[in-house]
Amino acid sequence: MKRNLRLGLLWSWFWMILGWLYFLLPLLATFLFSLRAKKDTLSFLAYERVFKDPNFWKTFAFSLEIGLITILAGLVLIVPTAYWIRLRLPRLRMITEFVSMLPFVVPAIVLVFGLIRVFSGAPFYLTNTYMGTNALLVAAYIVLALPYLYRAIDTGLAAIDVRALTEAAQSLGAGWPVILLRIILPNLRVAMISAAFLTLATVMGEFTIASFLVGIKAFGPYMSLVGQNKTYESSSLAIISFVLTWAFMGFIQLFSRGRAEAAPPGAH
């Protein structure tokens, strides 16, 4: 019995280590390659060139701004919708979940060409103006991030008793704005933070939609352009984007753990 347990433990460690090596070795190779911009020595020259490039900061700031607007607009759209479906229209959950998964099925290239075809002519002409193009980009990113936004919010709502909280608030005379803003939203803090960081990570690295709508102004197309023309800088950008993505994931874990530690035993 003990021998079987030890054998099972060894196999578990073997596959876990193999998985980590499969994940980390390519990153390590990319990082070491990015340090070879200076001949016969290891240096951070490629990273210095990237950080000194004004286009890096311009595209990063642009995508960050678009990402924050996408998060805000997405949460305003998804939170009340998911709450109302949980509370009043539970039969629509299956349909809503199916619709939220469509961005995984419909390619981004199909989405962006459809948007350009519809909104570049009468009566909209959104692609003819700076604000219109940015609004179209935000709308496209909301659709692209819909699986992460909806699933995170719906999971957060499933963890609380929405009906009981709503009925208790109504019995005390609270209206719908008060219920949503002062009761439901505080209980969805972790879910909204998770959805926000996942959406931001998606927006920062997205290439297809941004390249057709705004071109090199976005961070994703900028990384692609650097990858086509600069060898070592492209490797350094890959490492930077990886660090950013994992930083977002770390923030999710940090806020989630803080919320769990702050919640009293038996709280819902």
Image (cartoon, rainbow, N blue to C red):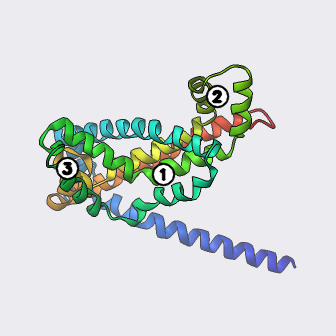
Q: Which percent across, then down, holds residue 193?
A: 52, 39
Q: Which percent across, then down, holds residue 90?
A: 63, 50
**Of 156 and 110, the residue lying toward us:** 110
Disc 3 target residue: 213
Instruction: Please identify, in this view, whether the residue under mark 2 or under mark 3 is nearer the observer.
Output: 2
Secondary structure under badge 3? helix
Instruction: Please identify, in this view, whether the residue under mark 2 or under mark 1 is nearer the observer.
Output: 2
Disc 2 target residue: 183
Residue type at tag 2: Ile
Disc 1 target residue: 148
Report the residue that reaches farthest toward the right.
Answer: 1
Kindly identify the residue that appears in the image at 36 percent across and 64 percent down: 106
Q: Is residue 118 above or below residue 82?
A: below
Q: Is residue 151 left or right of residue 86?
A: left
Q: Quadrant of the N terminus?
A: bottom right
**Of 3 and 93, the residue lying toward us:** 93
Q: Quadrant of the C terminus?
A: top right
Mark 3 or mark 1: whose residue is earlier in sequence: 1
- Whether the residues at callouts 3 and 1 have beta carbons within 8 Å, the answer is no
Kindly identify the residue that appears in the image at 62 percent across and 74 percent down: 14
Report the residue that reaches farthest toward the top.
Answer: 173
Secondary structure under badge 2? helix
Secondary structure under badge 1? helix
Q: Is residue 82 left or right of residue 6?
A: left
Mark 2 or mark 3: whose residue is earlier in sequence: 2
**Of 250 and 21, the residue lying toward us:** 250
